[in-house]
Image (tube, rainbow, N blue to C red):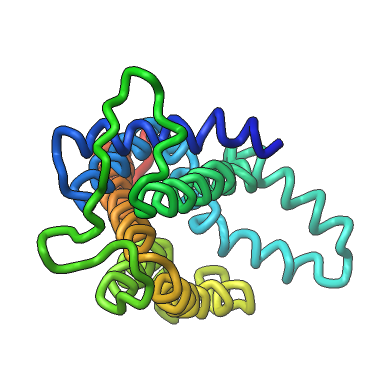
Amino acid sequence: MGAIFEAILTQPIFNLFVWIYNYIPDVGVVILIITVLIKLALYPSTNKSIKAQKDLTELQPKLEELKKKYAGDQQKIATETMTLYKEHKVNPFGSCLPLLIQLPVFIALYWVLQSVFKGDNFDLLYSFVQNPGHINSVTLGLFDLKEAGNIFLAVLAGGAQFAQAKMFTRKKAPKAAGEGGKDESMTAMMNKQMTYFMPLITVLIGYQLPGGLALYWFLSTGITALQQVILFRKHDGNDNNKKDGNVIEGKLID
């Protein structure tokens, strides 16, 4: 299993890393380029994940209404929940796929950085990739990406995580919206707590990891957050166009 993982992920990323470094001898820039390439490869699945997560967020008030309406009848709640998902074409597991893909990539990158920073461990190089002999772990003359304990990069990673999560936080509905418009359920409160808790965990973990991984975490999360902004604007723009095209003086036009 380890050999398969190495052949599919670790070795290709290792060779890509060294190949780029031969032309651009700055590990920070190399990590940036690799991050962009990985995000481009995952772009379609990430798009689906973001859409699924946004759809789930928007369905939350209706899900809470179901729980109140059928309180005590878990089977009915489950049935109606699945019906609601089907009606709105929402896949509740759609947001998990990119995370499952990203984790092996993250682990592979960890081993790649461990290898390239050892100085002479280039056994995984393909025959057509030139051996640089040595890779300088310092980027921009400021950060040693080989070393752990870089609080600056860890905080950047946590900040990007917070920005990404904050986009999915629903605003509290006004009292005029009635009971059906409220989103202050236990689930909603837990989601809000996770918005602040996960960035803190990111900072703590990022501080323990080599600076190169903290940088990758920051860049990857930041690019995903930017992708969310673009998709949300497109989504909101489509919604506004639909409303503008279907509503005249408060009346719906079929």
Q: Where is residue 42 in the image (x, y as percent from the top left)?
A: 42, 35
Q: Can residue 177 be seen in this view?
A: no
Q: In which quarter of the image is the C terminus?
A: top left
Residue at the (34%, 69%) spot, across then down: 147
Q: In this view, does 16 lie to the left or right of 27?
A: right
- Outermost residue, top side: 128
Q: In this view, does 83 lie above or below 136?
A: above
Residue at the (49%, 38%) spot, across then down: 10
Q: Position of residue 103 (x, y in %)?
A: 54, 49
- Residue 108 or residue 124, whichever sits in front: 124
Residue at the (14%, 68%) spot, across then down: 142
Q: Quadrant of the N terminus?
A: top right
Q: Position of residue 46 (x, y in %)?
A: 44, 40
In which image quadrant can residue 23 be found?
A: top left
Q: Is residue 56 above or below residue 30?
A: below
Q: In this view, does 26 lie above or below 130?
A: below
- Outermost residue, left side: 141
Q: Position of residue 252 (x, y in %)?
A: 38, 40
- Residue 157 or residue 210, whichever sits in front: 210
- Residue 195 or residue 149, whichever sits in front: 149
